[in-house]
Structures are given as C-alpha cells and as structure tokens.
Image (cartoon, rainbow, N blue to C red):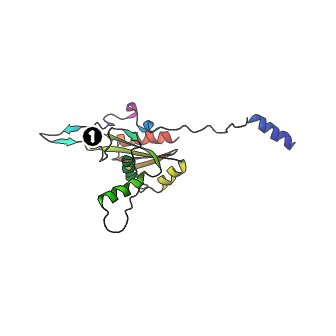
Amino acid sequence: MLKTIVLAMSIAIPSGASQSSPRRVVTMQELTVPAERLPTGCVLSPGGTVRLDGNTVRMRNWAGLQIPSNPWAGTDRPLVASIRERMEPTVTPDGPPPSRSEAASFRLHFADGVEDAYAAIYEQSDAELIVVYASRFATSDKAVESLRYGRWSNNPRVIRVAIGPIVAMVQGDAGACFDAVGAHLRSLEK
C-alpha cells in the first residue's frame, strides 16, 4: 500500500517541478513609482535650479547625493557607498581623525556586498522631499540581515522593506506623497 502512495505521488509531481511558483525578480527601475500612482503635486524632483522670491535661486542637490539623474540606479562604487551609508548605521574607526584619502577609502566599505543601488527623490512641495534609497545584495539573506540591523526601525518617517535581495527605504515627512511611495514599495514585497 505504501509503495502505491509513493508511486502515485511521484507521477503527480513531475521531476524538477516546484510546488510553489518562483518569485518574480524585481528590477531597480520598478522601484520608481509610476506617475499615475502618485497623488497630485507629488513628482520626481527635477534637476537644475528653482527661482524663489526676488533674485534668490536654489540649486537642487537631490538630498545631498551626487547622482547624475533622478531616479538613479547603478554600480558606481562611490555612489553605492553613499546610498548604503544613508541606509545603515555609520561607525567610524577610533583614533586620530583620518586623512581625506583614508576617510574616502573607509567610506567605500559601505559598497561591499552590494551589487547595485538606487535612489529617487520625490517632492510634494518646495520644502518636502521624499527620498528612496535601495541596495541589492547578492542574496535575500543579506538583505534581511541589513533590514534587521538598520538604525531606522522605530522612526515613523521611515519605511523599510525587503524585496527579495533588495532592501529599500523611504524617508521623508508624512503625507500623501510619502504614503504613496511607501505603498508602492510594499506592493513589490509580495
């Protein structure tokens, strides 16, 4: 009787078939919220300058990141390190202050283990920026580990999600734009 059940099971499930469907791989570009899912007034921040009152001009620096476009995804090691540094706790070495080259070299360790990174800056108004940072690790285990030890876990102005091997973080003032960007990232978790 037992041989019959085992034989029936082996016929029902072809060799190499999986009982659960494979998880879809999310690309970094999919982290960008489609314009139709953003509330009125919430847009990707354009580059360049903004003319304020009178002769005052403000440069847009995209939240202090030196990214060449918004959104940005890529493997440029200094940019990857800069994005990851914003997502993880920063621990500086003890001792005398490092030289400029030593500090730059130390910062690059944030890019270790990251395959590529992503950043996007949305704005709801001139004063409100909603920033998305993401890092793709080699494995989902590394992403979960990064998510677990992030310094932002109890901050209501931060949403962190793990999307397979990607850890993404939304940071900004609460509001409709923040909620829409966070909802989009959470929808990719599934």
Query: Taking 159 as reference, is 96 above or below it?
Result: below
Q: Residue 112: where, in percent of width, then height?
A: 45, 52
User: Looking at the image, can residue 31 be seen?
Assistant: yes
In the displayed structure, 48 sits above or below 140; it is above
The N terminus lies in quadrant: top right
Which amino acid, by three-letter code, is at mark 1?
Ser
Q: Which residue is mark 1?
A: 125
Please give the name of the residue rendered at 43% of the width and 36% of the height, measured from the top-left corner. 29
Q: Residues within 10 Å of mark 1 (few under 14, many from 20)?
A: few
Q: Provide the secondary structure element on which disc 1 rests.
A: loop
Q: Is residue 155 visible?
A: no
Left or right of residue 140: residue 69:
left
- Left or right of 177, for residue 136: right
The residue that appears at 51% across and 47% down in the rendered structure is: 138
Question: x, y (%) of residue 11?
Answer: 78, 35
* Residue stretch in magenta: 33-41
